[in-house]
Amino acid sequence: MIVAVTGVILILFVIGHLLGNLQIFLGPAWINGYAEHLRDLGPLLWVIRAFLLVDVVAHIYYTVRLAIENRRARPTSYRRKDTVKATFASRHMVMSGLIVLAFIIFHLLQFSFRTTDPRFAILPADPLGHYDVYTMMVLGFSSPLVSGFYILALFLLALHLSHGSSSFFQSLGLNNKNLTPRLAQGGRIFAWLLFVGYSSIPVAVLLGWVTLRTHS
């Protein structure tokens, strides 16, 4: 139950974060204005961040705990193990979750604390006096290594969500024989739409579709 609820909270955040980030395609003024609105929240922004941090820690802790309990329930391995219903995503939830956690830490160091690239600390404000998030994102994703890690983490996140977004309903007892396949299919579609949305940003930068330019 805790894994399911904390997971839904994180899914809602991922959706909101994507909608904000996609504004980079609308130009510097849009994405920088969005970032400035977040900064205007002041102490409330840090409350939200702290809440999300606690949610992430709780989600990971209880996911790992469930995995350990499942393993302890059968200490002796099967002589032969044929997968019937479990998907690759469902069998590797812990692994994908921990790798995504490593990515989140790097992502925060890169764009929130701006410690991974010395250029970020000296970027001037944009013409409206907002922090230049647009330029920071273009510079950051111009590195194939950074973009590659970003896309890999998003791929694993999509695998994680393709199982987690549908299993949430099962954990809360909100599914049945007819509804379960539809929820599973919807979860997969939802997860890969998120992957396409997030990955479109580094891909666009690498291909030169989003470039450094005059703010407008």
Image (cartoon, rainbow, N blue to C red):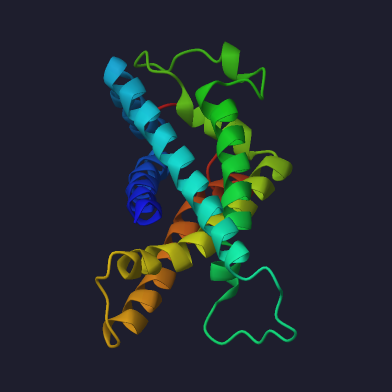
Q: Position of residue 59 (x, y in %)?
A: 45, 47
| Vertical comparison of 54 with 184: above or below | above
Foreground of the two, 30 or 37: 37
Task: Decide if residue 41 is in sight here.
Answer: no
Report the residue at 39% width, 47% height from top.
14
Could you tell me which quadrant the C terminus lies in?
A: top left
Report the residue at 35% width, 50% height from top.
15
Report the residue at 34% width, 33% height from top.
30
Foreground of the two, 181 or 190: 181
Q: Number of marks in the image?
A: 0
Foreground of the two, 98 or 71: 71
Could you tell me which quadrant the N terminus lies in?
A: bottom left
Q: Position of residue 182 (x, y in %)?
A: 32, 81
| Vertical comparison of 95 with 110: above or below | below
For this orientation, the residue located farthest to the left is 174
Q: Position of residue 34 (x, y in %)?
A: 32, 30
Quadrant position of residue 130? top left
Task: Decide if residue 125 is in sight here.
Answer: yes
Report the residue at 54% width, 78% height from top.
86
Position of residue 94 in the picture relative to residue 175 (left or right): right
Q: Position of residue 110 (x, y in %)?
A: 59, 28
Foreground of the two, 134 or 79: 79
